[in-house]
Image (cartoon, rainbow, N blue to C red):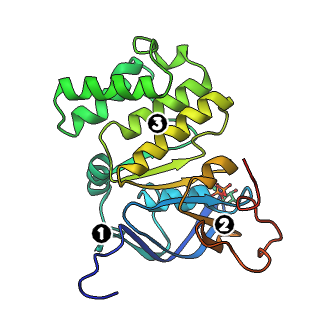
Amino acid sequence: MSAAEPPPLLRAEGLVKSHRNGAVSIPAVRGVDLEVARGEFTAVTGPSGAGKSTLLHLLGGLQRPDQGTLALDGARVDGCSESQWAVLRRRRYGIVFQSGNLLSDLTVADNVELPALLCGMTARTARSRRTELLEQLGLEGTSDRGPSELSGGERQRVALARALVNEPDLLLADEPTGNLDSRSAREVLALLTRFHGQGRTIVLVTHDARVAGSADRVISLFDGRIADDARLSDPPAGPHPYGVRPVLELGD
Ligand code: ADP
């Protein structure tokens, strides 16, 4: 990297993470080096148990690596405290995990507006961002409902609106179109594409070929390691390490 070149938005080096299950240690991420440039849309694919969710948790500071380093804009963040991470996430990250992260006592409107208010947006801007996002996700009319009055797919989209409301630099999303009907999946993909088009960075886990096909880059994780890292603009040569090209060979 030349001195004039800015550091990547994210740089992970030698990330290793095992989960403990009683006395048993389960390796999930076994040595991942990854640089994500600002503005890049990266899809992470791979079979169940490959370590995709764990990697996403490590990149968002929601789990700590056993080994390795993580830098955001060139500054090490792996030594940050929980409260420093909470501030970083509030200001810079949008995060959507499969479990969703809605507050059950708040309406949809309040769930979406809250992160924006916590980030210092005015109530008026937060309201207008909320209205815009819910509309783009086909959720107009749900504002006054509680999360328990929504379908699983609706909750998932509200969680995405909540993650994007404070216009984060980086969106981390785990299967944002999983469990969605095709129309809702299209709305989510259109929103992600618009967000990316504004120069923002996305790292998402997906099994959805259409979503991965919209990315700049597809990383295949296998057994806790990066087995393939393909820019969609330059098609791969040779066979895939585990025999399938899940994304690149799937058409629309
Ligand atoms: P993926 O997202 O690719 O399905 P995960 O990161 O969820 O993979 O899981 C990687 C491995 O770590 C799997 O063997 C999984 O069972 C294990 N694992 C993930 N989370 C936990 C946890 N909280 N406790 C114990 N084992 C876990």
Please state which amino acid type lies under the numbered disc 1: Asp
| Amino acid on which the number 2 mark rests in the picture | Ser
How far is the residue under mark 2 from the one under mark 3? 23 Å
Q: Can residue 108 be seen here?
A: yes
Q: Secondary structure at mark 3?
A: helix
View extreme (bottom): residue = 2
Q: Is residue 23 found left or right of 90 in the rendered image?
A: right
Residue tagged by mark 2?
Answer: 220
| Secondary element type, mark 2 | strand
Left/right placement of residue 202 relative to residue 125 reads right
Mark 2 vs 3, N-terminal side: 3
Q: 51 above or below 114? A: below
Find residue 100 and report its horizontal and vertical position in percent. 52, 35
> In the image, is 221 to the left or to the right of 188?
right
Give SS at disc 1.
Answer: loop
Q: Residues within 10 Å of mark 2 (few under 14, many from 20)?
A: many
Q: Which mark is residue 160?
A: 3
- Would you identify the image quadrant in which residue 113 lies? top left
Mark 3 and mark 2 in contact (Cβ < 8 Å)?
Answer: no
**Residue name at image x 67 percent, y 31 percent:** 182
Residue drawn at (44%, 62%) of the image: 40
Given the image, on which type of amino acid does mark 3 rest?
Leu
